Amino acid sequence: MPPRVLTVAGSDSGGGAGIQADLKTMLALGVHGMSVITAVTAQNSLGVQGAWELPAEAVRAQYRSVVDDIGVQAVKTGMLASAELVEAVAELISGTDAPAVVDPVGVSKHGDPLLAASALESVRTKLLPAATVATPNLDEVAQLTGVCVESEDDLRRAAAAVLEYGPRWVLIKGGHLPGNADAVDLLTDGSAERWLRAPRHDNRHTHGTGCTLASAIACGLAKGLAVPEAVTAAKEYVTGAIAAGFALGAGIGPVDHGWRLRG
């Protein structure tokens, strides 16, 4: 039986992000992927045209159905939409004996809001404390903590601000940091640090990058890797997926989740 990983996230009808990206990543990395859908989006390469969250009761029922029968070795969370869903999912993962990777999704790649402003405090006080690893990008760091990252030196300050909310580890994703030749991320638990650098590819087809990275980390954890090793392997995987990203539709295309399978 392969390791089992559960994604708790929204659906992307265009197939580039959300549960679709998560499940593709899990298949590519050799684990059995399962899903709890929290919201349905009408989404394509141009943006998000609509979003409808599911009732908390439906989310709980999906989660219990999978975990109680099949079991999980890791959980990954993505789009949770509302305070009610954030709190429901935080309670579920807190009661599950498996590592949790929390991607605190705030906006889409196109800038469309995917989390209600009223849910931010629930993310800070309920969801982040339940995380084994939190993976905010720079916009999400600013949204959650007020820390604006303008240079590599600010990454430590951002990490410290997120760690105050209780995750065991935080990965500050510096891919949006201007002026850097490399994409630089900082992983830390407040004492140990690992700086992860990769070439910045000249490719605008990066839809689903955050979902893919968080899912890849969850796959590593499900296989028994320690957090630093899981994150390092995930960074390598997503860097290759970005390099192989392809045009789809008239806007921003997706990363290529199957790049290794074709390589």
Image: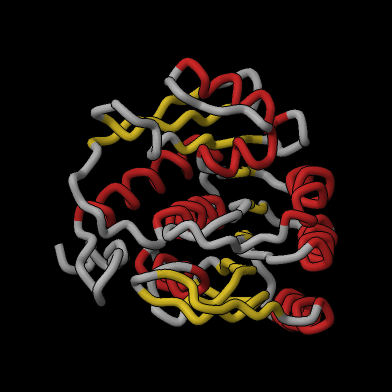
Question: For this rendering, which residue is in front, 78 or 30?
Answer: 78
Q: Is residue 63 left or right of residue 105?
A: right
For image coordinates 73% across by 74% down, the residue present is 67
Count of picture labels: 0
Q: Is residue 76 left or right of residue 196?
A: right
Question: For this rendering, which residue is in front, 137 or 244?
Answer: 137
Residue 234, placed above or below residue 259: above
Displayed quadrant of residue 244? bottom left
- Residue 191 seen anywhere in this rendered image of the structure: yes
Residue 63, placed above or below residue 141: below
Residue 83, x across and y down, in percent: 80, 61
Residue 141, placed above or below residue 110: above
For image coordinates 56% across by 28% down, the residue present is 148
The colour scheme used here is secondary structure
Q: Residue furthest left?
A: 263
- Image quarter (top left, top right, bottom left or bottom right) of the C terminus: bottom left
For image coordinates 57% across by 69% down, the residue present is 4
Displayed quadrant of residue 212? bottom left
- Residue 96 seen anywhere in this rendered image of the structure: no
For image coordinates 65% across by 22% down, the residue present is 190
Q: Is residue 199 left or right of residue 22?
A: left
Residue 9, x across and y down, in percent: 61, 69
Residue 34, x across and y down, in percent: 57, 76
Q: Is residue 248 left or right of residue 227?
A: left
Displayed quadrant of residue 191? top right
Residue 96, x across and y down, in percent: 78, 61
